[in-house]
Amino acid sequence: MYSGYLDRRQKLALDEAYKLYRQIIRGEKKADLYQVANALTTLNTALQDHGDSHFKMTKRLWQRMFVSLCDLLVTSFPVYVIIYDQEGGIQTPFEPIIEPAMIEIHALGLKRKTDIFSLDLAQFNPMTRLGIEKTWISRGPMLNPEDFENLDCGEFCTTKNFLIGDDVLRKESELGKERAYKRWWELYWQAYCAVNPLDQQLVQQEMHTLEEVWGNLYY
């Protein structure tokens, strides 16, 4: 029978990721490296288009949440970055960054392949972007939280992190969990009754995908 259970110690469901993000942005909780990484991994999965009509999310808002958490990861923890140009070539440290550029983030202490995150340089907060550019030229690909302190953004100062679409994200995370639970059990019985091994495998894969986004639905 179905064996696609995830290691719950290494996952955050989408509704939990939203709550974590909300608490961090509001200053109610201190950012934890592993929790932030798990939230980003879950968001990565959720933002992929699996063609499932059961769940219609406001992806633009969830993408903003992903961007905000990437920004938080870079500015709050030691990381090293790989910077790619438009053609996918790796850019050279200690030289000006050629844009458009994609930043690949590797946080120290994280070892899973799923803990590598990518973001367009232009999507970072202007202050974070300035810190990345200055450090890349002066010290290379290693970034530390201190690199983002005492930066002068001049006339381009903006709020670093803020909640946007809070009510929409909250409702979608709660409603999505309920729908995912119902859908998971529909699939459970489909897999149980399936005679064809290929049909059973396809159903189990959809169950696995639901759990990647919504956590443990077997309750």
Image (cartoon, rainbow, N blue to C red):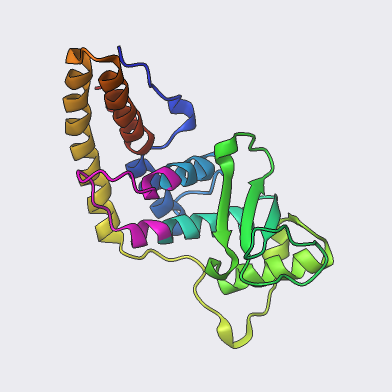
Residue 150 as seen in the image, left or right of residue 38: right
Q: Relative to 106, is 3 above or below?
A: above
Q: In which quarter of the view is residue 22 placed?
A: bottom left
- Magenta residues, start to end: 44-63
Judged left or right of residue 219, residue 36 is right
Quarter in which the N terminus is drawn: top left
Q: State the image coordinates of residue 75 (x, y, percent, origin top left).
A: 63, 58
Question: Quick check: is 121 in the magenta stretch?
Answer: no
Nearer to us in this view, 191 or 112: 191
Whether residue 61 appears in magenta in the rendering, the answer is yes
The answer to whether any part of residue 149 appears in the image is: no
Residue drawn at 23 percent across, 46 percent down: 55
Tell me where residue 135 appears, x and y as whole percent: 76, 65
Q: Extreme bottom residue here?
A: 155
Q: Residue at x 49, y 59 (%)?
A: 67
Whether 216 is drawn above or below 34: the answer is above
Residue nearest the viewer, comparing 111 with 205: 205
Residue at point 43% right, 26% down?
8
Image vertical order of residue 157 relative to residue 110, above or below = below
Q: Is residue 69 visible?
A: yes
User: Where is the C terminus found, in terms of image quarters?
Assistant: top left
Q: Position of residue 56 (x, y in %)?
A: 23, 51
How far from the left and from the top, in percent, is residue 30?
A: 52, 49
Residue 180, by quadrant, is: top left
189 relative to 160, above or below: above
The quarter holding residue 86 reads bottom right
